[in-house]
Amino acid sequence: MIFAVDIIMHQLQNMKRTILSTIAALAVALAAPEASACTSLIAAPGATADGSSIITYAADSHTLYGELYRQPAADHAAGTMRPVVEWDTGKLLGEIPEASHTYATIGNMNEHGLTIAESTWGGRPELEGSGIIDYGSLIYITLQRAKTAREAIDVMTGLVRDYGYASSGESFSIADADEVWVMELIGKGKADKGAVWVARRVPEGYISGHANHARIHKFPLKDKNTIYSPDVIDFARKQGYFSGKDKDFDFSLAYAVTDAGALRGCDARVWAYFRRFAPQAEIDAYIPWIMEGKGEPMPLWVKPVKPLTANDLKSMMRDHFEGTHLDMTKDIGAGPFECPYRWRPMGYTVDGQEYTHERAIATQQTGFSFVADMNKARHDAMRGILWFGVDDANTCVYLPVFNSTDTVPRALDGHADLYTLSWDAMFWVNNYVANQAYNRYSQMIPDIRRVQGALEQQIGDDVAKAAAEGASQDALRQLTMHWASKATADYKQLGDYLFVKYLDGNIKKEADGKFARTADGMPEQPVFGGYNERYFRSIVEDAGERLKVPEIKL
Protein backbone atom coordinates (compact mmCIF):
# COMPACT_ATOMS: atom_id res chain seq x y z
CA MET A 1 0.00 0.00 0.00
CA ILE A 2 1.06 3.60 -0.21
CA PHE A 3 0.58 6.71 1.81
CA ALA A 4 0.57 10.43 1.14
CA VAL A 5 2.74 12.64 3.34
CA ASP A 6 -0.29 13.33 5.52
CA ILE A 7 -0.64 9.67 6.44
CA ILE A 8 2.11 9.88 9.01
CA MET A 9 -0.07 12.23 11.02
CA HIS A 10 -3.47 10.72 10.46
CA GLN A 11 -3.20 8.24 13.33
CA LEU A 12 -2.94 11.15 15.78
CA GLN A 13 -6.48 11.96 16.82
CA ASN A 14 -7.64 15.55 16.16
CA MET A 15 -4.25 16.56 14.65
CA LYS A 16 -4.75 19.12 11.87
CA ARG A 17 -2.84 18.87 8.62
CA THR A 18 0.05 21.30 8.42
CA ILE A 19 2.74 22.18 5.94
CA LEU A 20 5.17 19.54 4.79
CA SER A 21 8.06 20.65 6.98
CA THR A 22 5.96 20.31 10.13
CA ILE A 23 4.84 16.86 9.10
CA ALA A 24 8.39 15.75 8.50
CA ALA A 25 9.58 16.98 11.89
CA LEU A 26 6.93 14.97 13.70
CA ALA A 27 7.02 11.92 11.41
CA VAL A 28 10.31 10.61 12.74
CA ALA A 29 8.65 9.52 15.96
CA LEU A 30 5.64 7.88 14.33
CA ALA A 31 5.12 4.62 12.47
CA ALA A 32 2.85 4.25 9.45
CA PRO A 33 0.88 1.02 8.93
CA GLU A 34 2.97 -1.88 7.68
CA ALA A 35 2.77 -2.65 3.97
CA SER A 36 0.73 -5.63 2.89
CA ALA A 37 -0.78 -7.23 -0.19
CA CYS A 38 -2.47 -5.04 -2.80
CA THR A 39 -4.11 -5.41 -6.22
CA SER A 40 -3.98 -3.13 -9.28
CA LEU A 41 -6.03 -3.81 -12.42
CA ILE A 42 -5.63 -1.95 -15.72
CA ALA A 43 -7.69 -1.16 -18.81
CA ALA A 44 -5.84 0.85 -21.47
CA PRO A 45 -7.56 3.20 -23.94
CA GLY A 46 -9.15 1.14 -26.66
CA ALA A 47 -10.16 -1.47 -24.09
CA THR A 48 -12.63 0.95 -22.49
CA ALA A 49 -16.04 2.00 -23.76
CA ASP A 50 -15.30 5.75 -23.76
CA GLY A 51 -11.56 5.80 -24.44
CA SER A 52 -10.55 6.28 -20.83
CA SER A 53 -7.44 4.96 -19.15
CA ILE A 54 -8.53 3.07 -16.04
CA ILE A 55 -6.46 1.66 -13.20
CA THR A 56 -7.55 0.32 -9.84
CA TYR A 57 -5.94 -0.12 -6.46
CA ALA A 58 -6.77 -1.85 -3.18
CA ALA A 59 -4.63 -0.82 -0.21
CA ASP A 60 -4.87 -3.95 1.92
CA SER A 61 -3.59 -3.91 5.48
CA HIS A 62 -4.78 -5.06 8.88
CA THR A 63 -3.70 -1.74 10.45
CA LEU A 64 -4.64 0.83 7.79
CA TYR A 65 -7.49 3.24 8.49
CA GLY A 66 -9.22 4.15 5.24
CA GLU A 67 -9.30 7.85 4.41
CA LEU A 68 -8.53 10.29 1.61
CA TYR A 69 -5.21 12.15 1.70
CA ARG A 70 -4.49 15.50 0.06
CA GLN A 71 -1.48 17.72 -0.56
CA PRO A 72 -2.00 21.22 -2.00
CA ALA A 73 0.12 22.65 -4.76
CA ALA A 74 3.01 24.78 -3.50
CA ASP A 75 5.95 26.93 -4.56
CA HIS A 76 9.29 26.41 -2.83
CA ALA A 77 12.23 28.75 -2.43
CA ALA A 78 15.59 27.79 -3.92
CA GLY A 79 17.54 25.61 -1.53
CA THR A 80 14.46 24.12 0.14
CA MET A 81 15.00 20.49 1.15
CA ARG A 82 12.28 17.84 1.19
CA PRO A 83 12.31 15.23 3.96
CA VAL A 84 11.92 11.64 2.80
CA VAL A 85 10.00 9.59 5.34
CA GLU A 86 9.64 5.82 4.94
CA TRP A 87 5.94 5.08 4.67
CA ASP A 88 5.96 1.69 6.34
CA THR A 89 7.94 2.72 9.43
CA GLY A 90 7.75 6.50 9.77
CA LYS A 91 11.56 6.59 9.77
CA LEU A 92 13.23 9.70 8.37
CA LEU A 93 15.49 8.33 5.61
CA GLY A 94 17.05 11.61 4.54
CA GLU A 95 16.20 14.66 2.45
CA ILE A 96 16.41 15.75 -1.17
CA PRO A 97 16.16 19.13 -2.91
CA GLU A 98 12.54 20.21 -3.28
CA ALA A 99 11.11 21.09 -6.68
CA SER A 100 10.45 24.78 -7.26
CA HIS A 101 6.75 23.96 -7.75
CA THR A 102 4.84 20.88 -6.65
CA TYR A 103 1.43 19.82 -7.98
CA ALA A 104 -1.63 19.19 -5.86
CA THR A 105 -2.49 15.57 -5.10
CA ILE A 106 -5.73 13.98 -3.97
CA GLY A 107 -5.36 10.35 -3.00
CA ASN A 108 -3.19 8.69 -5.65
CA MET A 109 -4.10 11.23 -8.35
CA ASN A 110 -2.66 14.66 -9.02
CA GLU A 111 -4.25 17.81 -10.41
CA HIS A 112 -3.34 16.79 -13.98
CA GLY A 113 -5.05 13.41 -13.68
CA LEU A 114 -1.81 11.42 -13.42
CA THR A 115 -2.47 8.39 -11.20
CA ILE A 116 -0.08 5.82 -9.72
CA ALA A 117 -0.90 2.53 -7.96
CA GLU A 118 1.35 -0.27 -6.73
CA SER A 119 1.69 -3.77 -5.39
CA THR A 120 4.64 -5.13 -3.43
CA TRP A 121 6.27 -8.40 -4.46
CA GLY A 122 9.39 -8.36 -2.34
CA GLY A 123 11.66 -10.38 -4.59
CA ARG A 124 15.08 -11.75 -3.72
CA PRO A 125 15.70 -10.68 -0.11
CA GLU A 126 19.37 -9.87 -0.72
CA LEU A 127 18.28 -7.12 -3.15
CA GLU A 128 16.29 -5.02 -0.72
CA GLY A 129 17.31 -1.42 -1.32
CA SER A 130 19.56 0.64 0.91
CA GLY A 131 19.05 4.15 -0.51
CA ILE A 132 16.70 6.84 0.79
CA ILE A 133 13.74 6.69 -1.65
CA ASP A 134 11.21 4.11 -0.48
CA TYR A 135 8.34 3.03 -2.70
CA GLY A 136 5.76 5.29 -1.05
CA SER A 137 7.96 8.36 -1.35
CA LEU A 138 8.69 7.35 -4.94
CA ILE A 139 4.99 7.55 -5.76
CA TYR A 140 4.05 10.72 -3.93
CA ILE A 141 7.13 12.73 -4.83
CA THR A 142 6.46 11.78 -8.45
CA LEU A 143 2.79 12.80 -8.31
CA GLN A 144 3.94 16.21 -7.11
CA ARG A 145 6.49 16.57 -9.95
CA ALA A 146 5.10 14.91 -13.11
CA LYS A 147 2.16 15.65 -15.42
CA THR A 148 2.14 12.52 -17.60
CA ALA A 149 2.87 8.82 -17.29
CA ARG A 150 6.09 9.08 -19.29
CA GLU A 151 7.26 12.02 -17.20
CA ALA A 152 6.45 9.95 -14.11
CA ILE A 153 8.70 7.10 -15.25
CA ASP A 154 11.54 9.58 -15.82
CA VAL A 155 11.03 11.11 -12.37
CA MET A 156 10.77 7.77 -10.59
CA THR A 157 13.83 6.23 -12.22
CA GLY A 158 15.77 9.46 -11.76
CA LEU A 159 15.00 9.55 -8.05
CA VAL A 160 16.27 6.01 -7.44
CA ARG A 161 19.30 6.68 -9.62
CA ASP A 162 20.25 9.86 -7.77
CA TYR A 163 19.31 8.97 -4.20
CA GLY A 164 19.04 5.18 -4.13
CA TYR A 165 16.07 2.88 -3.58
CA ALA A 166 15.06 1.88 -0.05
CA SER A 167 12.39 -0.83 -0.49
CA SER A 168 11.91 -4.31 -1.94
CA GLY A 169 10.44 -5.33 -5.31
CA GLU A 170 7.46 -3.26 -6.52
CA SER A 171 5.07 -3.16 -9.45
CA PHE A 172 3.57 0.21 -10.39
CA SER A 173 0.57 1.12 -12.54
CA ILE A 174 1.24 4.58 -13.99
CA ALA A 175 -1.55 6.20 -15.98
CA ASP A 176 -2.66 9.44 -17.58
CA ALA A 177 -5.56 10.10 -19.94
CA ASP A 178 -3.56 8.85 -22.96
CA GLU A 179 -1.70 5.74 -21.80
CA VAL A 180 -0.97 3.25 -19.04
CA TRP A 181 2.39 1.75 -18.12
CA VAL A 182 3.43 -1.10 -15.85
CA MET A 183 6.84 -0.57 -14.26
CA GLU A 184 8.61 -3.15 -12.09
CA LEU A 185 11.60 -2.22 -9.98
CA ILE A 186 13.87 -3.79 -7.39
CA GLY A 187 16.98 -2.62 -5.53
CA LYS A 188 20.52 -3.93 -5.89
CA GLY A 189 21.17 -4.73 -2.26
CA LYS A 190 23.60 -3.23 0.24
CA ALA A 191 26.55 -2.86 -2.13
CA ASP A 192 24.72 -0.62 -4.63
CA LYS A 193 21.99 1.81 -3.61
CA GLY A 194 20.47 1.93 -7.10
CA ALA A 195 17.82 -0.24 -8.73
CA VAL A 196 17.09 -2.28 -11.83
CA TRP A 197 13.77 -1.89 -13.58
CA VAL A 198 11.68 -2.35 -16.69
CA ALA A 199 8.56 -0.46 -17.83
CA ARG A 200 6.11 -1.47 -20.55
CA ARG A 201 3.22 0.45 -22.03
CA VAL A 202 -0.01 -1.53 -22.08
CA PRO A 203 -1.12 -1.59 -25.74
CA GLU A 204 -4.34 0.15 -26.72
CA GLY A 205 -7.23 -2.29 -26.57
CA TYR A 206 -5.71 -4.49 -23.83
CA ILE A 207 -6.15 -5.10 -20.11
CA SER A 208 -3.45 -5.92 -17.58
CA GLY A 209 -2.84 -6.10 -13.85
CA HIS A 210 -0.52 -7.07 -11.02
CA ALA A 211 -1.13 -8.37 -7.52
CA ASN A 212 2.04 -8.80 -5.44
CA HIS A 213 4.05 -10.78 -7.97
CA ALA A 214 6.32 -9.47 -10.74
CA ARG A 215 4.38 -9.76 -13.99
CA ILE A 216 6.91 -8.66 -16.62
CA HIS A 217 8.58 -11.76 -18.02
CA LYS A 218 10.39 -11.60 -21.39
CA PHE A 219 10.29 -8.19 -23.07
CA PRO A 220 11.47 -6.70 -26.40
CA LEU A 221 14.90 -5.12 -26.18
CA LYS A 222 14.20 -2.61 -28.98
CA ASP A 223 10.72 -1.19 -28.67
CA LYS A 224 9.58 2.40 -28.11
CA ASN A 225 6.95 1.19 -25.65
CA THR A 226 9.41 -0.73 -23.49
CA ILE A 227 12.00 1.07 -21.34
CA TYR A 228 14.49 -0.52 -18.97
CA SER A 229 17.56 0.27 -16.94
CA PRO A 230 20.78 -0.25 -18.92
CA ASP A 231 22.05 -2.93 -16.54
CA VAL A 232 18.82 -4.86 -15.92
CA ILE A 233 20.21 -7.97 -17.68
CA ASP A 234 23.90 -7.52 -16.85
CA PHE A 235 23.18 -7.18 -13.16
CA ALA A 236 21.17 -10.43 -13.20
CA ARG A 237 24.14 -12.17 -14.86
CA LYS A 238 26.54 -10.73 -12.31
CA GLN A 239 24.35 -12.01 -9.48
CA GLY A 240 23.97 -15.45 -11.03
CA TYR A 241 20.22 -15.09 -11.64
CA PHE A 242 20.47 -15.50 -15.44
CA SER A 243 22.92 -17.02 -17.91
CA GLY A 244 21.13 -17.22 -21.26
CA LYS A 245 20.91 -14.96 -24.28
CA ASP A 246 19.65 -11.40 -23.78
CA LYS A 247 16.53 -12.07 -25.85
CA ASP A 248 15.53 -14.84 -23.42
CA PHE A 249 15.87 -12.73 -20.28
CA ASP A 250 12.84 -13.00 -17.97
CA PHE A 251 12.62 -10.16 -15.43
CA SER A 252 10.13 -11.90 -13.13
CA LEU A 253 11.98 -15.22 -12.99
CA ALA A 254 15.29 -13.45 -12.43
CA TYR A 255 14.34 -11.04 -9.67
CA ALA A 256 11.11 -12.27 -8.05
CA VAL A 257 10.52 -15.36 -5.92
CA THR A 258 8.12 -17.61 -7.84
CA ASP A 259 6.48 -20.02 -5.42
CA ALA A 260 2.96 -21.24 -4.61
CA GLY A 261 2.16 -18.06 -2.73
CA ALA A 262 3.22 -15.89 -5.65
CA LEU A 263 1.11 -17.83 -8.15
CA ARG A 264 -1.96 -19.09 -6.28
CA GLY A 265 -2.07 -16.11 -3.92
CA CYS A 266 -1.09 -13.36 -6.37
CA ASP A 267 -1.19 -14.15 -10.10
CA ALA A 268 -4.53 -15.87 -9.52
CA ARG A 269 -6.14 -12.50 -8.80
CA VAL A 270 -5.03 -11.20 -12.19
CA TRP A 271 -6.15 -14.49 -13.76
CA ALA A 272 -9.65 -13.91 -12.31
CA TYR A 273 -9.74 -10.45 -13.92
CA PHE A 274 -8.61 -11.77 -17.28
CA ARG A 275 -11.07 -14.66 -17.12
CA ARG A 276 -14.05 -12.42 -16.55
CA PHE A 277 -13.40 -10.17 -19.54
CA ALA A 278 -11.27 -12.20 -22.00
CA PRO A 279 -12.18 -15.52 -23.68
CA GLN A 280 -12.50 -18.08 -20.86
CA ALA A 281 -10.95 -20.96 -22.79
CA GLU A 282 -7.90 -18.84 -23.54
CA ILE A 283 -7.46 -17.78 -19.93
CA ASP A 284 -8.22 -21.20 -18.46
CA ALA A 285 -5.14 -22.46 -20.30
CA TYR A 286 -3.16 -20.71 -17.56
CA ILE A 287 -4.75 -22.67 -14.70
CA PRO A 288 -1.70 -24.99 -14.54
CA TRP A 289 0.48 -21.89 -14.14
CA ILE A 290 -1.43 -20.36 -11.24
CA MET A 291 -2.05 -23.69 -9.51
CA GLU A 292 1.27 -25.50 -9.95
CA GLY A 293 3.67 -23.21 -11.80
CA LYS A 294 3.48 -25.41 -14.90
CA GLY A 295 3.34 -24.33 -18.53
CA GLU A 296 3.84 -20.82 -19.86
CA PRO A 297 3.59 -17.83 -17.52
CA MET A 298 0.41 -15.83 -17.81
CA PRO A 299 0.86 -12.91 -20.24
CA LEU A 300 1.23 -9.35 -19.03
CA TRP A 301 -1.86 -8.29 -20.96
CA VAL A 302 -4.79 -9.81 -22.88
CA LYS A 303 -7.50 -8.46 -25.17
CA PRO A 304 -11.01 -8.31 -23.65
CA VAL A 305 -14.04 -9.54 -25.54
CA LYS A 306 -15.82 -6.20 -25.05
CA PRO A 307 -14.89 -2.67 -24.00
CA LEU A 308 -14.87 -2.14 -20.24
CA THR A 309 -16.37 0.66 -18.16
CA ALA A 310 -15.45 2.07 -14.78
CA ASN A 311 -18.42 0.12 -13.40
CA ASP A 312 -16.90 -3.10 -14.74
CA LEU A 313 -13.70 -2.36 -12.83
CA LYS A 314 -15.65 -1.53 -9.66
CA SER A 315 -17.38 -4.89 -9.98
CA MET A 316 -14.05 -6.65 -10.47
CA MET A 317 -12.68 -5.10 -7.30
CA ARG A 318 -15.47 -6.97 -5.50
CA ASP A 319 -14.41 -10.37 -6.84
CA HIS A 320 -13.98 -13.54 -4.75
CA PHE A 321 -13.35 -15.90 -7.69
CA GLU A 322 -17.10 -16.35 -8.14
CA GLY A 323 -17.89 -18.66 -11.07
CA THR A 324 -14.40 -20.20 -11.18
CA HIS A 325 -12.85 -23.35 -9.72
CA LEU A 326 -11.52 -21.17 -6.88
CA ASP A 327 -14.96 -19.79 -5.93
CA MET A 328 -14.74 -18.96 -2.23
CA THR A 329 -18.48 -19.36 -1.66
CA LYS A 330 -18.47 -23.07 -2.56
CA ASP A 331 -16.23 -24.96 -0.12
CA ILE A 332 -17.07 -25.79 3.49
CA GLY A 333 -14.93 -22.87 4.63
CA ALA A 334 -17.73 -20.59 3.42
CA GLY A 335 -19.91 -21.90 6.24
CA PRO A 336 -23.68 -22.11 6.21
CA PHE A 337 -24.11 -18.66 4.65
CA GLU A 338 -21.70 -19.02 1.68
CA CYS A 339 -19.34 -16.35 2.97
CA PRO A 340 -16.41 -15.62 0.60
CA TYR A 341 -14.08 -14.54 3.40
CA ARG A 342 -11.45 -16.37 5.42
CA TRP A 343 -9.85 -15.03 8.56
CA ARG A 344 -6.07 -14.85 8.76
CA PRO A 345 -3.60 -16.48 8.82
CA MET A 346 -4.08 -17.72 5.27
CA GLY A 347 -1.91 -20.82 5.66
CA TYR A 348 -2.59 -23.74 8.01
CA THR A 349 -1.39 -27.29 8.57
CA VAL A 350 -3.47 -30.41 9.14
CA ASP A 351 -1.82 -33.79 9.78
CA GLY A 352 1.50 -32.43 8.57
CA GLN A 353 0.11 -31.19 5.23
CA GLU A 354 0.17 -27.47 4.42
CA TYR A 355 -3.00 -25.84 3.08
CA THR A 356 -4.04 -22.32 2.13
CA HIS A 357 -7.13 -20.19 1.97
CA GLU A 358 -7.74 -18.43 -1.34
CA ARG A 359 -6.60 -14.81 -1.59
CA ALA A 360 -9.19 -12.89 -3.62
CA ILE A 361 -9.18 -9.29 -4.85
CA ALA A 362 -11.88 -8.26 -2.37
CA THR A 363 -10.76 -8.78 1.19
CA GLN A 364 -11.91 -7.71 4.62
CA GLN A 365 -8.73 -5.85 5.59
CA THR A 366 -8.75 -3.25 2.81
CA GLY A 367 -8.13 0.26 4.10
CA PHE A 368 -9.15 2.02 0.91
CA SER A 369 -9.53 1.24 -2.76
CA PHE A 370 -10.15 3.19 -5.92
CA VAL A 371 -11.01 2.98 -9.60
CA ALA A 372 -9.20 5.84 -11.37
CA ASP A 373 -10.75 6.94 -14.68
CA MET A 374 -8.72 9.41 -16.78
CA ASN A 375 -10.31 10.77 -19.97
CA LYS A 376 -9.06 13.69 -22.10
CA ALA A 377 -12.54 14.22 -23.56
CA ARG A 378 -13.67 15.62 -20.21
CA HIS A 379 -12.76 19.19 -19.29
CA ASP A 380 -9.71 19.86 -17.14
CA ALA A 381 -11.47 19.99 -13.76
CA MET A 382 -12.71 16.42 -14.16
CA ARG A 383 -10.15 14.94 -16.53
CA GLY A 384 -9.47 12.43 -13.78
CA ILE A 385 -12.15 10.83 -11.62
CA LEU A 386 -10.95 8.90 -8.60
CA TRP A 387 -13.83 6.60 -7.64
CA PHE A 388 -12.81 6.22 -4.01
CA GLY A 389 -14.04 3.74 -1.39
CA VAL A 390 -12.99 2.81 2.11
CA ASP A 391 -12.92 -0.60 3.84
CA ASP A 392 -13.85 -3.77 1.94
CA ALA A 393 -14.29 -2.99 -1.78
CA ASN A 394 -17.09 -5.58 -1.94
CA THR A 395 -19.40 -3.55 0.28
CA CYS A 396 -18.08 0.00 -0.10
CA VAL A 397 -19.71 2.80 -2.07
CA TYR A 398 -17.35 4.31 -4.64
CA LEU A 399 -17.51 8.09 -4.25
CA PRO A 400 -16.50 10.57 -6.98
CA VAL A 401 -13.33 12.54 -6.27
CA PHE A 402 -11.98 14.71 -9.08
CA ASN A 403 -8.46 15.75 -10.04
CA SER A 404 -9.50 19.32 -9.15
CA THR A 405 -10.88 18.39 -5.72
CA ASP A 406 -9.29 20.64 -3.11
CA THR A 407 -11.33 19.71 -0.03
CA VAL A 408 -11.56 16.37 1.76
CA PRO A 409 -15.11 15.59 2.98
CA ARG A 410 -15.46 14.95 6.70
CA ALA A 411 -16.65 11.42 5.94
CA LEU A 412 -13.26 10.67 4.36
CA ASP A 413 -10.87 12.74 6.49
CA GLY A 414 -8.76 11.74 9.47
CA HIS A 415 -11.00 12.87 12.33
CA ALA A 416 -11.28 9.22 13.46
CA ASP A 417 -8.81 6.35 13.27
CA LEU A 418 -8.59 2.57 13.59
CA TYR A 419 -9.11 2.77 17.36
CA THR A 420 -11.65 5.61 17.36
CA LEU A 421 -15.14 4.87 16.03
CA SER A 422 -17.08 7.70 14.45
CA TRP A 423 -20.51 7.44 12.82
CA ASP A 424 -19.51 10.41 10.64
CA ALA A 425 -16.65 8.40 9.11
CA MET A 426 -17.40 6.32 6.00
CA PHE A 427 -14.75 3.79 7.02
CA TRP A 428 -16.61 2.96 10.22
CA VAL A 429 -20.13 2.82 8.77
CA ASN A 430 -18.93 0.54 5.98
CA ASN A 431 -17.35 -1.72 8.58
CA TYR A 432 -20.64 -1.64 10.51
CA VAL A 433 -22.39 -3.01 7.42
CA ALA A 434 -19.67 -5.38 6.21
CA ASN A 435 -18.91 -7.05 9.51
CA GLN A 436 -22.55 -7.94 10.01
CA ALA A 437 -22.62 -9.47 6.53
CA TYR A 438 -19.56 -11.63 7.19
CA ASN A 439 -21.67 -13.63 9.67
CA ARG A 440 -24.82 -13.99 7.52
CA TYR A 441 -23.47 -13.27 4.04
CA SER A 442 -25.94 -15.03 1.73
CA GLN A 443 -28.86 -13.55 3.65
CA MET A 444 -27.58 -9.98 4.01
CA ILE A 445 -25.73 -9.31 0.76
CA PRO A 446 -28.94 -8.78 -1.30
CA ASP A 447 -29.95 -5.99 1.10
CA ILE A 448 -26.49 -4.43 0.85
CA ARG A 449 -26.45 -4.65 -2.95
CA ARG A 450 -29.83 -2.90 -3.10
CA VAL A 451 -28.59 0.16 -1.18
CA GLN A 452 -25.08 0.11 -2.63
CA GLY A 453 -26.39 -0.22 -6.18
CA ALA A 454 -28.94 2.57 -5.80
CA LEU A 455 -26.34 4.95 -4.40
CA GLU A 456 -23.77 4.20 -7.09
CA GLN A 457 -26.40 4.56 -9.82
CA GLN A 458 -27.47 7.97 -8.51
CA ILE A 459 -23.86 9.07 -8.11
CA GLY A 460 -23.01 7.90 -11.62
CA ASP A 461 -25.96 9.83 -13.04
CA ASP A 462 -24.85 13.01 -11.26
CA VAL A 463 -21.26 12.64 -12.51
CA ALA A 464 -22.45 12.05 -16.10
CA LYS A 465 -24.61 15.16 -15.87
CA ALA A 466 -21.69 17.18 -14.49
CA ALA A 467 -19.51 16.02 -17.37
CA ALA A 468 -22.16 16.90 -19.97
CA GLU A 469 -22.67 20.36 -18.47
CA GLY A 470 -18.97 21.10 -17.99
CA ALA A 471 -19.45 21.60 -14.27
CA SER A 472 -17.14 24.06 -12.53
CA GLN A 473 -14.55 23.10 -9.94
CA ASP A 474 -16.83 24.45 -7.22
CA ALA A 475 -19.79 22.42 -8.50
CA LEU A 476 -17.65 19.27 -8.60
CA ARG A 477 -16.45 19.96 -5.06
CA GLN A 478 -20.03 20.23 -3.86
CA LEU A 479 -20.95 17.01 -5.68
CA THR A 480 -18.19 15.14 -3.85
CA MET A 481 -19.13 16.66 -0.49
CA HIS A 482 -22.82 15.87 -0.96
CA TRP A 483 -22.39 12.22 -1.89
CA ALA A 484 -19.78 11.54 0.76
CA SER A 485 -22.17 12.84 3.40
CA LYS A 486 -25.27 11.12 1.99
CA ALA A 487 -23.60 7.75 1.42
CA THR A 488 -22.28 7.79 4.99
CA ALA A 489 -25.71 8.59 6.41
CA ASP A 490 -27.44 6.01 4.20
CA TYR A 491 -24.96 3.30 5.17
CA LYS A 492 -25.45 4.03 8.86
CA GLN A 493 -29.18 3.51 8.28
CA LEU A 494 -28.40 0.33 6.35
CA GLY A 495 -26.33 -1.00 9.25
CA ASP A 496 -29.16 -0.25 11.68
CA TYR A 497 -31.62 -1.97 9.36
CA LEU A 498 -29.49 -5.11 9.11
CA PHE A 499 -29.06 -5.23 12.88
CA VAL A 500 -32.82 -5.09 13.43
CA LYS A 501 -33.86 -7.35 10.55
CA TYR A 502 -31.46 -10.22 11.34
CA LEU A 503 -31.47 -10.00 15.13
CA ASP A 504 -30.94 -13.32 16.95
CA GLY A 505 -30.64 -15.39 13.78
CA ASN A 506 -34.17 -14.57 12.64
CA ILE A 507 -35.29 -12.67 9.53
CA LYS A 508 -38.05 -10.15 10.16
CA LYS A 509 -40.87 -9.92 7.64
CA GLU A 510 -41.49 -6.68 5.78
CA ALA A 511 -44.45 -5.02 4.11
CA ASP A 512 -44.57 -1.69 2.25
CA GLY A 513 -40.99 -0.90 3.20
CA LYS A 514 -41.52 -1.44 6.91
CA PHE A 515 -41.16 -4.34 9.30
CA ALA A 516 -44.49 -6.17 9.37
CA ARG A 517 -46.85 -6.04 12.34
CA THR A 518 -50.02 -7.92 13.11
CA ALA A 519 -53.42 -6.25 13.00
CA ASP A 520 -52.96 -5.64 16.71
CA GLY A 521 -49.65 -3.87 16.21
CA MET A 522 -47.41 -6.68 17.41
CA PRO A 523 -44.30 -7.87 15.51
CA GLU A 524 -45.16 -10.67 13.09
CA GLN A 525 -43.53 -14.04 13.60
CA PRO A 526 -40.15 -13.89 11.80
CA VAL A 527 -38.76 -16.28 9.23
CA PHE A 528 -36.29 -18.82 10.62
CA GLY A 529 -33.45 -18.66 8.11
CA GLY A 530 -31.67 -21.77 9.34
CA TYR A 531 -28.71 -23.12 7.36
CA ASN A 532 -28.04 -24.48 3.90
CA GLU A 533 -28.17 -28.19 3.10
CA ARG A 534 -24.41 -28.60 2.88
CA TYR A 535 -24.01 -27.32 6.42
CA PHE A 536 -26.71 -29.66 7.71
CA ARG A 537 -24.92 -32.57 6.01
CA SER A 538 -21.61 -31.58 7.61
CA ILE A 539 -23.29 -31.66 11.03
CA VAL A 540 -24.73 -35.09 10.32
CA GLU A 541 -21.32 -36.37 9.17
CA ASP A 542 -19.73 -35.08 12.36
CA ALA A 543 -22.35 -35.86 15.01
CA GLY A 544 -25.26 -37.51 13.23
CA GLU A 545 -25.64 -40.46 15.57
CA ARG A 546 -26.01 -38.21 18.59
CA LEU A 547 -28.39 -35.82 16.87
CA LYS A 548 -30.53 -38.37 15.04
CA VAL A 549 -34.20 -38.19 16.01
CA PRO A 550 -35.28 -41.68 17.08
CA GLU A 551 -38.62 -43.15 16.14
CA ILE A 552 -40.47 -43.49 19.44
CA LYS A 553 -43.94 -45.00 19.75
CA LEU A 554 -45.25 -45.65 23.23
Image: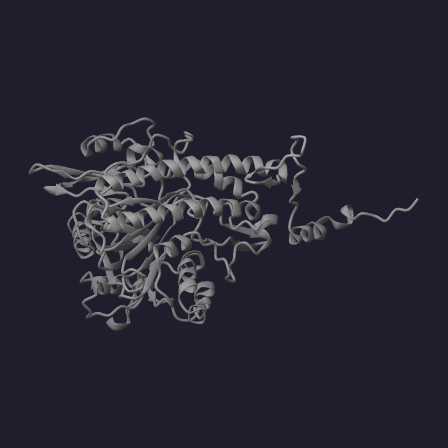
- On the rendered image, what quadrant is the C terminus found in? top right
x, y (%) of residue 323? 51, 61
x, y (%) of residue 266? 41, 56
Report the number of numbered marks: 0
x, y (%) of residue 505? 63, 39
Q: Residue furthest front?
A: 519
In depth, the one of 82 and 403 nearer the eye is 403
Location of residue 208 (image quadrant): bottom left
Position above or below: 268 against 243:
above
Left or right, 525 with reference to 256: right
What scheme was used to colour the molecule? one colour
Left or right, 505 with reference to 287: right
Q: Residue furthest right?
A: 554
x, y (%) of residue 218? 29, 68
Q: Residue at x 34, y 52 (%)?
A: 56
Can the viewer see residue 85? no
In depth, the one of 229 and 98 nearer the eye is 98
